[in-house]
Image (cartoon, rainbow, N blue to C red):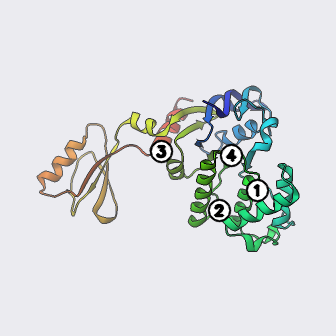
Amino acid sequence: MAYALEIKNLTKRFGNKTVVDDISFTVDEGEVFGFLGPNGSGKTTTIRTALGILRQDAGEVRLLDGLTASEAMPRVGYLPEERGLLRKEKVSNILRYLGRLRGLSKADALDRGLELLHRVGLYEHRDKKVEGLSRGMTQLVQFVAALIHRPDLIILDEPFAGLDPLNVQLMKEILAGEQTRGATVIFSTHVLSDVEEMSERVALIADSRLILFGDLAEIRRSRGANAVVVEAPSHPGDLPGAQRYAGRGGRVEYRLDDGLTPETILKAYSSSGIVLSRFEQVLPSLNDIFIEEVSNARQHN
């Protein structure tokens, strides 16, 4: 398997503080990969070190099947968490300049930039200065800048921050198209439902250490069902040991505690004479796994 990113025993310190501690994981070419962790866990430092913005204290990083960061940069698109565009400059001029830095001709950089502005609905703002744009618009311009040279590896740090749901969906559709083209997408976000929707594999770090890495579906299956979803016209008033989360349309989710089984819940409905329209065992969500793993890691530190 060819790797878009290969990290081996990566360590990064700032003074006496270890921010990234002996982390190893790989990202396959052509996949969408979720890189997760609570605030201050070391995600952004890992990304910046992988891109050569920071120098590691130990370990090795290779991109695009064996290249160093400097060798790979012409084929990498990066959307940082911070806004970094020149506020007094016009959007079209910025995109042309950044495209030129990525090896495009002046004409190709402008054409590609305007094409992408069309796609994200910002073409009419092409001659505006960055300072005249909203936060969400600025984020979309930086997104366009990351894609302008059709990179083989796209790394996005909190890409959906400041965007409304329509623009989040638009960005996801564009990224799906980039994956179809053959690009690899690595993204970090606090919105775990987006990771579940887009990613097949994930890495989770907490307090500078890697605590989870692998196929998300396999990780969820390995933990077994932790809830039962029921849809019915009414519900039993008392199910000892179960927590009930009401939803729309008669939907209720019961979290399974120790000693409580799906059979117990089913029997309670049957005994009450309630006819079910849905009864489904549910695997833990990424949010459940995130909370459990990070909590366990902190208890052991």
| Quadrant of the frame with the N terminus | top right
The alpha-carbon separation of the residues under discs 2 and 4 comes to 18 Å
Q: Earlier in the sequence, mark 1 or mark 3?
A: 1
Estimate how packed mark 1 is, as few (under 14), some (14 to 19) or many (20 or more) residues with alpha carbons within 10 Å.
many
Residue drawn at x 75%, y 36% as measured from the top left: 49
Residue at which label 4 appears:
155
Vertical relation: 93 (above or below) 82? below
Three-letter residue code for mark 1 = Ala
Three-letter residue code for mark 3 = Leu
Marking on residue 145: 1
Marking on residue 286: 3
Marking on residue 162: 2
Marking on residue 238: none
Q: Secondary structure at mark 4?
A: strand
Q: Secondary structure at mark 1?
A: helix
Q: Is residue 62 visible?
A: yes
**169 relative to 262 in the view: left or right:** right
Q: Earlier in the sequence, mark 4 or mark 1?
A: 1
Residue drawn at x 62%, y 32% as measured from the top left: 26
Count of marks, rendered view: 4
Front of the two marks 2 and 4: 4
**29 relative to 141 in the view: left or right:** left
